[in-house]
Image (cartoon, helix red, strand yellow):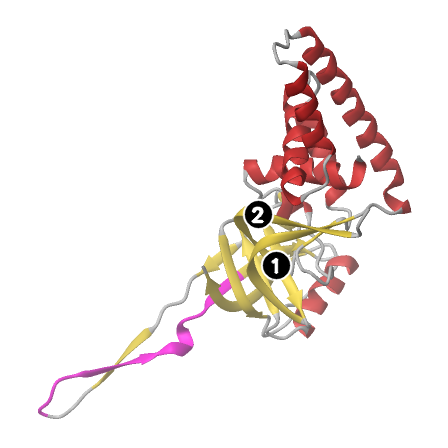
Amino acid sequence: MSDVKEFKLEVPIKAHVNIDGKNDIVDIDTLYLQAPTLKHRDAVIVLKKIYKIAHFNFEIMVENLKDNRSEEEKLKAQDNLNDVTEESDAILVEHVATILQGSDFDIIDFYKKFINFLSMEICYKDAECKNHATLHDLNLLHEPDYQKLIATYITFFFI
Amino acid sequence: MALKRKGDLFINGINITYEGNVKIEDGSITRVPNIQTNGDIVYTNDLTTNRSKIMVPIRVNSASNNTFDEFYNNEDNNVITYRDKNYTRCVMEVKPEREDEELTEYVFFGNPAV
């Protein structure tokens, strides 16, 4: 598990940053995500549990759907998820996003808990990780970035 | 007691709870006429009036005093966001009179930013 993951925003947000002692308002187009530490333990336990329930519900839903794909197609889809390449990272994130949106659970509550967790010095606005993103900054994210950010964090730090 | 508000005023990234209404006066360039004998009036621009004034009503207590003392000590190194308006290089020129548990008004002057 790498320590810092970059996340590029489709729609930049304006945020307060302090760079070398100078306060400024800048357009942020990249967020930097850090792995959770011991102080985030309680929040991580809750979020991982909710995600596992969502994943379980999703798998039940998929099993109940009639899968007309051939065995070869199913194996190829599984191989795509197992390969570790840059393109497959995007596929994994997409898969996690599909699980969250396809499951029957309180997704809004989960997203709110996740954003609170990210504001606990997990998500930063600069590469040096000196300006952490506040709740206000994260609430400025547009909807596609909002959902993709959470799916990306789960993919790279929870799974 | 005025209504406490939180969530739409940020100074240096810090969410500020204020009471009442934040007042903003956006400055403008002053056109100064220079009269010439037997000639047209020549207008020059006075840029010193082209700065915004942000007035923040705050309930005085030791926590708010410490916070705003820090903003004062930053000189013009403050940034303010109020709803959808941003201001950079904000300076508090003078500290207001502060009486414990009473409302006071902190005044900043700054550059509007897009």
- Left or right relative to A1: residue A71: left
Note whether A130 is above or below B83 in the view shown: below
- Tell me the CA gap for discs 2 and 1: 17 Å
Note whether B76 is above or below A142 in the view shown: below
Secondary structure found at label 2: strand
Q: Which mark is residue A9?
A: 2
Q: How many marks?
A: 2
Q: Give the image quarter of residue A88.
A: top right
| Residue at x-position 52% and y-position 69% | B109
Q: Residue furthest right?
A: A38
Quadrant of the frame with the C terminus of chain A: top right
Residue B21 in percent (x, y) is at 54, 50
Residue B114 in percent (x, y) is at 45, 59
Q: Nearer the viewer, residue B14 or A20?
A: A20
Secondary structure found at label 1: strand
Callout 2: 10 Å neighbours few (<14), some, many (20+)?
A: some
Q: Give the magenta range.
A: B38-54
Q: Amino acid at mark 2?
A: Leu
* Dot 2: chain letter: A
* Mark 1, residue position: A16
- Left or right relative to A129: residue B36: left
Q: Which mark is residue A8?
A: none
Q: Give the image quarter of residue B49.
A: bottom left
Q: Nearer the viewer, mark 2 or mark 1?
A: 2
Q: Nearer the viewer, residue B59 or A80?
A: A80
Residue B70 in percent (x, y) is at 71, 68
- Left or right relative to A72: residue B32: left
Q: Nearer the viewer, residue B52 or A90?
A: A90
Magenta stretch encompasses residue A158: no
Magenta stretch encompasses residue B46: yes
